[in-house]
Amino acid sequence: MAEILFLVHRAPWPPDRGDRIRSWHMFEALAKLAPVHVAALADNAADAAAARAKMAPLCKSLAIEVRGVSRLSALARAVLGGGPVSNQLFRNAALAEHIDALLALGTVTHIVAFSGQMAQYLPARFDGPVIMDFVDVDSAKFATYAEQDKRQPLNWVHTREAKKLEAFEADVARKVDASLFVSEAEAALFRERSGLGGDIVFAVENGIDTDRFDPALELDTAGEGEGPLAVFTGQMDYRPNIDAVHWFVADIFPLIRKSHPAARFAIVGRAPTEEVRALGALPGVTVTGEVPDVRPWLAAADAVVAPLLLARGVQNKLLEAMAMARPVVASAAAATGIDAVPGDHLLVADSAEAMATSVARLFDDRDAAAAMGKAARERMIARYGWDARLAPLVGLLGLDA
């Protein structure tokens, strides 16, 4: 009988951030195919406890360890050992021992690893199929960091990480049966960088729960106040999100307020850094911190914005907003990978002036904004159901649905 080992860098529950949304739905899809053993890490004890309470009844076995390696310590270990810092950040001896002991029992027939950091836990030899879901090309992300920030020692750290991760990713992909990425753009980039072909490198896109993200649901109120509201959602200790809201507040929002003096901007997401919290002191800007449910803020938005300067893969924040029938203004980087037509399902703008003009246009023409939101939701329903998105797993694992 088949049994699946699912290795995941953050315990999937609760699915309240992009990586955990994808890994949770992947876990659900795998559990429909065979009993699943989950071996995961958690950022803190509270996350670990929440995941254990939810997932234990759903798993054949469950092991979650709290990771506690600091970035400085991880850097030092990586330099001494010659590998990527990312791997050191997610290295845990207790989890490694658990995985080795589980595999030694001989009952696991398939392995799925989620996020490149978990490849370090894969056995050197395994008889069954091994699937590696890289999600994004992380090495390319660090290469972009290095291009954007020339300050030392950060530039050196990012340049080194990009090179080490690129070599590591390619080595892993040559050993596993299939490598997955969140969009065809990411998969194509990895094929180009690794030299591997489309026979083992695939795109398996993210989906969206359109029943949960439904504008017809009765939700708590949020964002009440005078003036049109623009909303950004995301994990607010993540560098690309931090850079995005800084750019919006510094360069885009002032242009919007010239034509709409009462305009408001809400930054909605958990773990805002001090620099993000400081933005809340500026006129018209609200920083919510963690909220129990992002949907009321999306429902309240007159426009949802995604001014990301750096984005990899498919942005869940856009899928959620579009499923909620909200009009979206996104940078080209944020919109990449989403199967939608600019001008019909969302607006795409890259300069501060173009983004400000697009947001103001939505504020001014509510009928057009509503029509775009309606078209966006219809697109999400037709294109992005999770069952359809994850259906390729059945064939890749050689299991019956």
Image (cartoon, grey):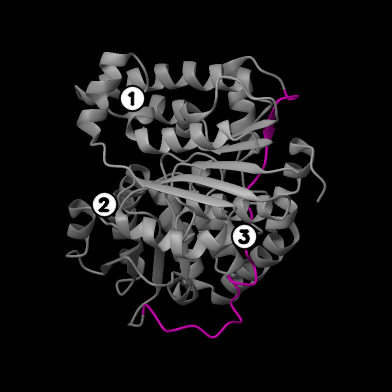
Dominant secondary structure, magenta: loop
Q: Which residue is mark 3?
A: 208
Q: Quadrant of residue 382?
A: bottom right
Q: Looking at the image, which residue is at 35% across and 33% down?
A: 93
Please, what secondary structure does the residue beneath circle 2 have? helix
Residue positioned 54% across, 51% down in the render:
61
Which disc is residue 355 wearing? none
Could you give the CA–CA distance between mark 2 and mark 1, rounded to whole angstroms? 23 Å
Q: Position of residue 124 (x, y in %)?
A: 55, 20
Q: Which mark is residue 250?
A: 2
| Occupied quadrant, residue 176 | top right
The residue lying toward the viewer, choosing from 176 and 255, is: 176
Amino acid at pointer 2: Ala
Q: Is the residue marked by circle 1 packed among few (<14), some (14-19), or many (20+) residues within 10 Å?
A: many
From the viewer's perspective, is 114 left or right of 98?
A: right
Asked if residue 165 is positioned above or below residue 263 in the image, the reply reads above
Instruction: Residue 92: tell me if it is visible.
Output: no
> Earlier along the polypeptide chain: callout 3 or callout 2?
3
Question: Residue 241 in the image: x percent, y percent?
Answer: 36, 49
Please identify the quadrant where the N terminus is shown: top right
In primary-sequence order, the first of circles 2 and 1 is 1
Marks 3,2: beta carbons within 8 A: no
Disc 3 marks a residue whose amino acid type is Ile
- Amino acid at circle 1: Ala
- The residue lying toward the viewer, choosing from 143 and 203, is 203
Span colored in magenta:
198-223
Question: Disc number at residue 146?
Answer: 1
**Secondary structure beneath disc 1?**
helix
